[in-house]
Amino acid sequence: MNEKELEYMKSAYGMLYEIEVKLDRMIVANLTKKYGYTWLLQRYETKTALHTRISYFVRYPNTLPHFTEDQIKLLYKLPNIRNKIAHAVLIDESEYKQIEKCYRLVKRQPIRKRERKSLIS
């Protein structure tokens, strides 16, 4: 890997790191607000895999209304790219652009978002 490729991979990893940290903060803040701190102790580990973090936005759509279905599909493409980076496999330009797109998407979301009202009463 040459110097330019190394910088490219460092940049990609930096964005992935920020995405993972922000997703963690969203999950912990919103689900703790909804279910209390005991939920945090019983259910969530900060060492959770990226695909599991993303799945929280599917399992708790009213409490975590940050992303649309299409945006979640986009986020679900990240774990494969992340694995390449973690194993020092050079990613291509389209994968880098995918990370950039997800990075912008996650960065613009607030940590806390007003809960969606359930249609079922």
Image (cartoon, rainbow, N blue to C red):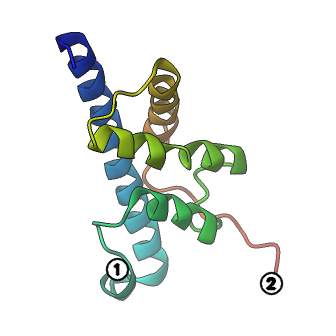
First in sequence: mark 2 vs mark 1? 1
Please give the residue where the numbered disc 1 appears in the rendered image: 40
SS type, badge 1: helix
Please tell me whether residue 91 is drawn above or below residue 58 in the rendered image. above
Q: Nearer the viewer, residue 60 or 92?
A: 92
Crowding at mark 2 (Cα within 10 Å: few <14, some 14-19, many 20+): few
Amino acid under label 2?
Answer: Ser
Residue 60 visible in the picture = no
- Image quarter where the N terminus lies is top left
Image coords of residue 79 (percent x, y): 45, 49
Please name the residue shown 52% across and 30% down the image: 98
Q: Quadrant of residue 29?
A: bottom left
Crowding at mark 1 (Cα within 10 Å: few <14, some 14-19, many 20+): some
Please give the residue where the numbered disc 2 appears in the rendered image: 121
Q: Nearer the viewer, residue 83 or 58?
A: 83
Please name the residue shown 41% across and 56% down the image: 50
Image coords of residue 25 (percent x, y): 35, 57
Please tell me whether residue 68 is drawn above or below residue 52 in the rendered image. above
CA distance for labels 2 and 1: 26 Å
Amino acid under label 1?
Answer: Leu
Q: Nearer the viewer, residue 23 or 7?
A: 7
Please tell me whether residue 33 is drawn above or below residue 112 in the rendered image. below
